[in-house]
Amino acid sequence: MKKLFKLTALVLVGLLASCGNAGESATDAAAGNAADAAYDNIMTRVSVRDYEARPVGRDTVELILKAAMQAPSAMKKFPRKYVVVEGAALDSLRAEFPNAAHSEGMKKAPLAIVVCGDMSRLDKDEAAAGDGFWVQDCSAAAENILLSAHALGLGSCWTGVWPAPGRSADMARLLSLPESLRPLCAILIGYPGKDVAEAEPRWNPDDVIWMK
Ligand SMILES: Cc1cc2nc3c(=O)[nH]c(=O)nc-3n(C[C@H](O)[C@H](O)[C@H](O)COP(=O)(O)O)c2cc1C
């Protein structure tokens, strides 16, 4: 009985192992394709400053926000909040921040995500000194927003808020944000219009120092 059990176990292990091997090459190929697609997505993203007026669905916006939240964060503090701005609030934002509306096409973007540092997630001394890694944490999330929007067939454009003097405080006031939130950037998002440039190759060996 013991032997039979052992044999059955061996056959099962063998079967599982062979299934694993057979599946591996298909998995490898899929991983290769996914890697190609991910790399291509990075290399073809551009800032979009011409949009269609059509809205972006809530589910799609949530996919983008999920990608933002997946970004790395120093010491896992995740000191970030996202303000999704649409409609009249977005009109006011564009009126007060000309850098988010310096082309007619930008005025058609149906939404913006304002990425904010959340000082309440930082240690008290960090928050008081305006220190910590909140700028880097928010920038990583912002890049994930740009890339995920592009992957989903949308266009986006980072418009600068922090550290331009006064701009972050003005944005916080405009959006009636609590004192703990510090806007870093407002990212316009929407379906790209016709006037969109192609990505330019930027490989420059002079920018690299190979150290041995
Ligand atoms: C910190 C930061 C601030 C930016 N601010 C603005 C802005 O206020 N308005 C704008 O149209 N684009 C802004 N951009 C987008 C840059 O102009 C754009 O990334 C640059 O021209 C390179 O083009 P690409 O994004 O198509 O690769 C900003 C980008 C970064 C990273």
Image (spheres, helix red, strand yellow):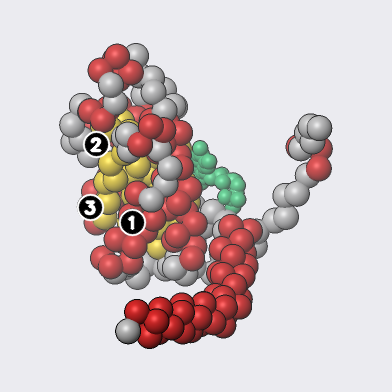
**Residue at which label 2 appears:** 174
Q: Give the structural element (helix, strand or loop) at label 3.
A: helix
In the image, taking residue 177 as reference, residue 194 lies left or right, namely right
The tag earlier along the polypeptide, 3 or 2, is: 3
Most foreground residue, 132 or 150 = 132
Location of residue 205 in the rendering, given as x and y in whole percent from the top left corner: 81, 42
Question: What's the amino acid at mark 3?
Answer: Ala
Location of residue 136 in the rendering, given as x and y in whole percent from the top left corner: 45, 33
Indicate the quadrant where residue 152 lies.
Answer: bottom left
Question: What's the amino acid at mark 2?
Answer: Leu
Indicate the quadrant where residue 194 lies.
Answer: bottom right
Location of residue 61 in the rendering, given as x and y in whole percent from the top left corner: 31, 61
The residue drawn where x is 20% and y is 35% is 177
The tag earlier along the polypeptide, 2 or 1, is: 1
**Residue at which label 3 appears:** 88
Mark 2 vs mark 1, foreground winner is: 1
Structural distance between the alpha carbons of marks 2 and 1: 25 Å
Q: Is residue 24 visible?
A: yes
Location of residue 210 in the rendering, given as x and y in whole percent from the top left corner: 79, 36
Question: What's the amino acid at mark 1?
Answer: Lys
